Image: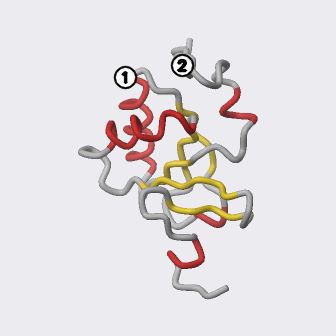
Amino acid sequence: MEEQCPLSHAYGDPKTLWRQKNFPLITFVSPQEAMGAEDRLKERGLCCLVVPTPRELAEGCGLSLRVFPDDLESCRGALKNGSTGARFFAWNGQTAGWCEIFGEKPLHLLRGQEK
C-alpha cells in the first residue's frame, strides 16, 4: 500500500497535483536522483508527484516531481544539500512557457535560443 501524502495547507487534496499541469516542477539529471528526492520530500511531509518531464524541459532524465506552489521554498531547502542536479521550474501563463525558479530566466534563454 502506497504511503499517503500529507495535505497541502492551501490546496487540500493531493490529487490536485495530478490535475494541475501548471504547478511547479523539479527536474533531475538521473532517475535515481528523482526517486531519492521524492523520498526526501515525503520524509519531510511535503507532497510531490512523479510525472514525465515536459518536452520543453527534457534535458534531464525524463522524470520530474510536481509540487504545490506553496511548498517550493520547503522543497528547495530539503533538496539543497542532497540533490545537486535539481532545477525548479514554474509555468508562466503570460508567456505560455516554463521559467526557471530561483534563477528567473525564461527557458528559451536557458537554452541560448532567441525569441
Q: Is residue 62 left or right of residue 31?
A: right
Position of residue 14 measured from the top left corner of the image (x, y, whole percent): 63, 23
Dot 2 corresponds to which residue?
5
Residue at 41% over, 31% down: 41
Dot 1 corresponds to which residue?
43
Q: Amino acid at mark 1?
A: Glu
Sort mark 1 into few (<14), some (14-19) or many (20+) by Cα contacts within 10 Å.
Answer: few
Residue at 26% over, 44% down: 82
Position of residue 51 measured from the top left corner of the image (x, y, whole percent): 62, 43
Foreground: 37 or 98? 98
Determine whether the residue tagged by mark 1 lies in a helix, strand or loop: helix
Residue furthest top as drawn: 1
Determine whether the residue tagged by mark 2 lies in a helix, strand or loop: loop
Sort mark 2 into few (<14), some (14-19) or many (20+) by Cα contacts within 10 Å.
Answer: some
Residue at 43% over, 25% down: 42
Report, in whole angstroms, how far the alpha carbon at label 1 lies from the one at label 2.
10 Å
